[in-house]
Image (cartoon, helix red, strand yellow):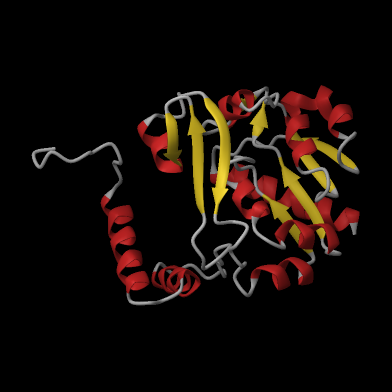
Amino acid sequence: ERYGLETWFKIGDMDFATHIYRTLMLRGKMRLSEVTDMIAKRLGIRHRIVPMTDDRVRTVVVTECGHMSFQEYFVEKRGEVRVKSVIYEGAEEAEPCSEVIPSIMDSRAVIIAPSNPILSIGPILALRGVREALRKTRAVRVGVTPIIGGRAVKGPADRLMRDLGIEPTAASVARLYSDILDLFIIDEVDASMAGEASKYVPRCIVTNTLMQTRQDRVRLATYILTAINEVR
């Protein structure tokens, strides 16, 4: 602030260090997938993490106040400005990382996590070849609702969907994923909506999807794996 610069993007020391490290590596001509793999290994993460692309793709939120980056919309404005549209800038030209399509095609199951369907999952599905791969794969394709009782568990998904003319319900999320899911999981709060959601996906099941503790996360993961085995 004393330097007269903007200070709305407040992050912790670990996040700040990671951003600096990643930027230095990218400026050194490393690919994002290489940097991601290096960071994961240094943090002791055993599982393989692959970004959707090594190319530049930028989520632009078109609001009543003008065009904004995702960070400006979500952090600076706290998702409180009205959204007119969302643009995935560069998605049509970008190529998926080399592991993305083979991973989709060769996996036993693909799980779409309960993230924002417009701002988090949308950019991935907009990338060339990803949605088509999800349509063609023989993997069991599972989605978990990010909307419970008409509200987002975290973040601005419900407000954003409403601004874009999409009713913020679990059934609406099922409709957005209707061509790429075999199974959709909704929360028990929305059990009465299972019939409507089933109009868009072959099968809809109900359970407690709210993850507040590690035990909750383990419980839901076990439930999903059991459901996948039943589908297969």
Q: Nearer the viewer, residue 191 or 146?
A: 146
Viewport quadrant of the N terminus: top left
**Residue located at (70% from left, 34% from top):** 208
Considering only vertical position in the picture, is 200 above or below 159? below
Image coords of residue 174 (percent x, y):
78, 37
Image coords of residue 226 (percent x, y):
80, 53
Q: Quadrant of residue 21?
A: bottom left
Q: Nearer the viewer, residue 21 or 231?
A: 21
Q: Quadrant of residue 84?
A: top right
Considering only vertical position in the picture, is 99 above or below 51? below
**Residue located at (78% from left, 30% from top):** 171
Image coords of residue 194 (percent x, y):
84, 30
Q: Nearer the viewer, residue 86 or 174?
A: 86
**Residue located at (40% from left, 67% from top):** 43
Q: Is residue 15 left or right of residue 111?
A: left
Q: Quadrant of residue 161?
A: top right
Q: Is residue 109 left or right of residue 67?
A: right
Considering only vertical position in the picture, is 129 above or below 66? below
Image coords of residue 48 (percent x, y):
57, 70
